[in-house]
Amino acid sequence: MAFKNLNSVLVVAAAVVLGVKAVDNGLAITPQMGWDNWNALGCDVSEELLQQTARLIVDYGLKDVGYHYVILDDCWSVGRNASNNSSLVADPVKFPNGMAAVADDMHALGLGFGMYSDAGKYTCGGYAGSLGYETVDANTWASWGVDYLKYDNCYNEGYAGNQQISSARYRTMGNALNATGRPILYSLCNWGEDYPWNWGSTIANSWRISGDVYDSWDLYDARCPCEGPNAFNCELPGFHCSITNIMNKASFIVSKAQPGAWNDLDMLEVGNGAMTDAEYVAHFSMWAAAKSPLIMGNDIRVIQPKDLAILSNAAVIAVNQDPSGSSAARRWMYDTNNTDSNGYPARIQMWSGSLQSTTGGDYSDMVVLLINGNNAETVMNATLADIFVDSGEQGTAPQVKMSWEVRDLWANRMSEADAAAIIAGSSAAGNATNATTVVAPRFNVSSTSYAEGLASNNSILLGNVTTTVLPSGTVLATVAPHGAAMFRLRALPTAVMKRDEL
Ligand SMILES: *[C@@H]1O[C@H](CO)[C@@H](O)[C@H](O)[C@H]1NC(C)=O
Ligand SMILES: *[C@@H]1O[C@H](CO)[C@@H](O)[C@H](O)[C@H]1NC(C)=O
Ligand SMILES: *[C@@H]1O[C@H](CO)[C@@H](O)[C@H](O)[C@H]1NC(C)=O
Ligand SMILES: *[C@@H]1O[C@H](CO)[C@@H](O)[C@H](O)[C@H]1NC(C)=O
Ligand SMILES: *[C@@H]1O[C@H](CO)[C@@H](O)[C@H](O)[C@H]1NC(C)=O
Ligand SMILES: *[C@@H]1O[C@H](CO)[C@@H](O)[C@H](O)[C@H]1NC(C)=O
Ligand SMILES: *[C@@H]1O[C@H](CO)[C@@H](O)[C@H](O)[C@H]1NC(C)=O
Ligand SMILES: *[C@@H]1O[C@H](CO)[C@@H](O)[C@H](O)[C@H]1NC(C)=O
Ligand SMILES: *[C@@H]1O[C@H](CO)[C@@H](O)[C@H](O)[C@H]1NC(C)=O
Ligand SMILES: *[C@@H]1O[C@H](CO)[C@@H](O)[C@H](O)[C@H]1NC(C)=O
Ligand SMILES: *[C@@H]1O[C@H](CO)[C@@H](O)[C@H](O)[C@H]1NC(C)=O
């Protein structure tokens, strides 16, 4: 216990001894998972879209690896009803059976239903916003059976500019949701304006840390300023933020994440088509290690096998859903002699973070994430001294003097053939299938939680042993262009080692 990683000790203390400091609605104890239509489909929403998508999330086994919330984004209302206490009215063309019926459909499949609104006069799409209508809207959503609210920041009438003003505006909705008595996961979306990582945890279950993501690995866009080391406390959230831009912004604030309250790096772009497979692997790995909510943002009706295989990787999701709830941190980032898509030096970086011990010993497992910003394959390495720097600087951590199993978390990525078989066995028309059972064994949260799977050494979650790293050693990996290597390190028994070897 004495040498356990500091992060996990703090989390245990916060959760068990002092009580969790996050918003107290019992939700998002691990980062929330689900799907939202915005990235792929924008305002093109309907009852049918949600029903088809929900069915496919079940058929494709995505529900069974943890994706739970089906979230309807902007553009669903036709305004307020003066005859009904100014409550919001769902668009009767897009949602002919009404929202309560949609929520029932989601619940019947064992999924949660999420909706969207805005802490302003209008939503970003120009529909009625909830500023000043927090109580009536929270009551409406609760009456419909809504389980999740994404709450945006457009047209906020200038109620921003410092942390108190922004937090008060968002707290009003948090209080209104709480007063309904229905646990509704609160996903705060003010794009990192007024530093929500400082105040979001007592109000909401997650807070966006940047302007909107777009489907690009590293292309600079002037509308999303603040790059690399200058991403710290960026004042203009902007939009069109690349994966590397958001990764940099996250690197400074990872310690703000805790059970019930997470840094939201924005919805996933996996499957939207503009990035390479390696880039999507790196994007998904990064979001998982940083304990971002994992909200799929692709059109599931046209998902490609390779993207289903990424989104289904339970070994990577197990890092995200780890019971210790501690985010990985960036240990180093180096310029290389190569250039990135913008002509700037391409960077390589290494992140590591403590996970729950799966050995039953005193030492936490560790996740190691190597990210290659080069346009060329790169041999990357990480020393135990750097991986465990939180437990002692310059190689003084006791873990540096131990041996570790190095387990590749991408080794058991589902094959494209298996993913294609799963997709072929279903249909957007929703015909019954059990195709999820015809391929190699998969992890299933509907019968075993990630915490239970990890505690029982489930091999799907632990990844494949590729090698062992010896005391004071180095983890080496050949990493694809704009790709990632991701490992789980597990302590090898020290009992067999002689005292003077330690
Ligand atoms: C409302 O807040 C109280 C106090 O934090 C908490 O105990 C309760 O569980 C919350 N209820 C809901 C429905 O979120
Ligand atoms: C507005 O509310 C009234 C009273 O509840 C109801 O009769 C009417 O159908 C509602 N109108 C719409 C468009 O929902
Ligand atoms: C109308 O909404 C307000 C909150 O905006 C609420 O206090 C009031 O109880 C509602 N009235 C009815 C009749 O539902
Ligand atoms: C009236 O408002 C209530 C609560 O806000 C809501 O549950 C109900 O669906 C609304 N009725 C109509 C007809 O819009
Ligand atoms: C990068 O360039 C410098 C200066 O040309 C050279 O000394 C160094 O070896 C290069 N590093 C790599 C990794 O190629
Ligand atoms: C999991 O594996 C570790 C290392 O082999 C072992 O020490 C531990 O007892 C195992 N736990 C269970 C529940 O089997
Ligand atoms: C690790 O990478 C650095 C920088 O590329 C290099 O100088 C060093 O030799 C590498 N170490 C090993 C063990 O490969
Ligand atoms: C990983 O281990 C499993 C089970 O031991 C094995 O079936 C699979 O082929 C291995 N994968 C790789 C890439 O080595
Ligand atoms: C799904 O439905 C389509 C269209 O009716 C049919 O061609 C296909 O065979 C069905 N697949 C399964 C697995 O039932
Ligand atoms: C489920 O899949 C298995 C294996 O492919 C098949 O034998 C069985 O008939 C299927 N069951 C149903 C109900 O479709
Ligand atoms: C996952 O477990 C649930 C509950 O036991 C079961 O209904 C479902 O069929 C399982 N899914 C798969 C893909 O095996």
Image (tube, helix red, strand yellow):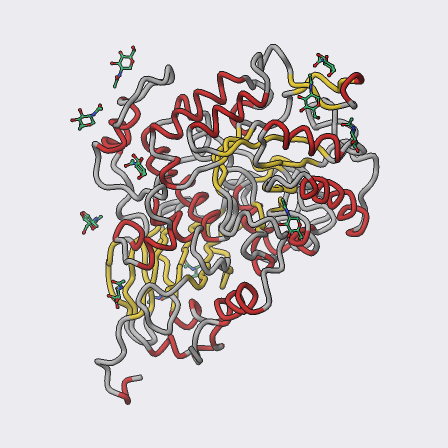
Image: 426 above or below 212 = above
Residue in the image at 63% along x and 32% along y: 142
274 or 355: nearer the viewer: 355
Residue in the image at 56% along x and 45% along y: 265
Q: Position of residue 320 (x, y in %)?
A: 44, 51
Which quadrant would residue 141 be assigned to in this image? top right
| 164 lies left or right of 196 | right
364 or 180: nearer the viewer: 180
Residue in the image at 46% along x and 55% along y: 348
Q: Where is residue 466 in the image (x, y as percent from the top left)?
A: 24, 58
Q: Quadrant of the N terminus?
A: bottom left
Residue 316 in view here: yes
| 470 lies left or right of 44 | left
Residue 334 in view here: no
Residue in the image at 34% along x and 79% along y: 401
Q: Where is residue 427 in the image (x, y as percent from the top left)?
A: 33, 18
Q: Position of residue 351 (x, y in %)?
A: 46, 59
* Numbered marks: total: 0
Q: Residue furthest right?
A: 158
